Amino acid sequence: MKAVFTRPKSLVDRPFHFCPGCHHGVIHRLVAEAIDHFGVRETTIGAASVGCSVFLYDYFDIDVVESPHGRAPAVGTGIKRANPDRFVLLYQGDGDLAAIGTSEIIHAANRGENLTVVFVNNTVYGMTGGQMAPTTMLGQKTTTSPYGREFGQDGYPIKMTEMIAQLEGVGYAARVAVDTPARLNQARKAIFQAFEAQIEQRGMGFVEILSTCPTNWGLSALDAVKRIESEMIPYFPLGVYKERKGNDFL
Ligand SMILES: Cc1ncc(C[n+]2csc(CCOP(=O)(O)OP(=O)(O)O)c2C)c(N)n1
């Protein structure tokens, strides 16, 4: 019988432990498909960050260096500069990339580091119990904004992809979601493009993926998936924000 669905070789054969309805597992699979597609499994070094994303070293059959919170872009820069032939993958949450590590990602992007960044935005600090992140939506209740985020006190949810896209060193920047089959296919395409940006030395390839955190949102898995469309996409529009074709900026 012809196999129509197989496990990507870059994922180890181990069940995910993520909460029911969390999108990390889906995103892991898409990233593993890209690693397989480009044949970089044996040359990839991941820079794991702090947060639920850190568990990628349990699931991907690649080498991974653990970074301090928010510092994956700095660690990844060192790995890539010392080993330009390696494929370097950063996988970061919003607390990690858009709070404690904001300056790291902005300067790595501005320097045009050839890194592929998968940015998983679930609008909270997931691993530590659902505190407010810079991407938390206005009105969203978290453990540190129990009455809902309010702009006068907490500012506005930060739009990282729009900021990153305007930096010269960026080869590709997109925001996607994985809440429907059609969007999942667009997300796969975007992740592949972000891989290509690094392989073709066009600067940073950056993909923001709108993701669920049912446990900390206090929603069922299904309602969490629905929230992506009803609340997140209207504020965080999906699309390709930058696509540099050549590397003439070098
Ligand atoms: C220097 C430092 N500060 C704080 C922490 C505590 N900490 C661990 S995970 C985390 C939040 C991660 O949130 P996010 O990046 O959004 O990832 P998620 O868990 O939602 O995937 C924090 C603050 C830490 N480990 N190290």
Image (tube, grey):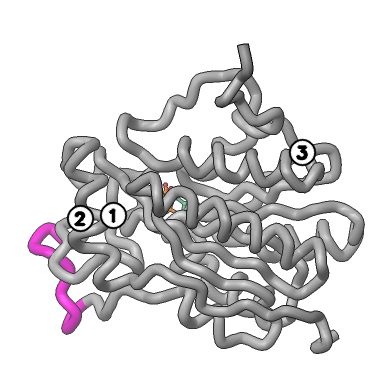
Does 126 sit left or right of 168 as displayed? Answer: left
State the mark number for residue 63. 3
Sequence-earlier tag: 3 or 1? 3
Residue at 24% across, 36% down: 221
Give, as a single range, the part of the protein colored magenta. 145-153
Does 92 sit left or right of 219 as displayed? Answer: right
Does 57 sit left or right of 55 as displayed? Answer: right
> What secondary structure do most residues of the magenta stretch adopt?
loop
* Amino acid type, mark 2: Thr
Residue at 31% across, 35% down: 21
Disc 1 C-beta below 8 A from ligand 1: yes
Residue at 48% across, 50% down: 185
Q: Quadrant of the N terminus?
A: top right
Label 3 crowding class (10 Å Cα cut-off): few <14, some 14-19, many 20+? some
Residue 238 rendering spot, x and y as whole percentages = 39, 68
State the mark number for residue 131. 1
- Verify whether residue 170 appears in magenta: no
- Of residue 225 and residue 154, the one placed in the foreground of this image is 225
* Amino acid type, mark 1: Gln
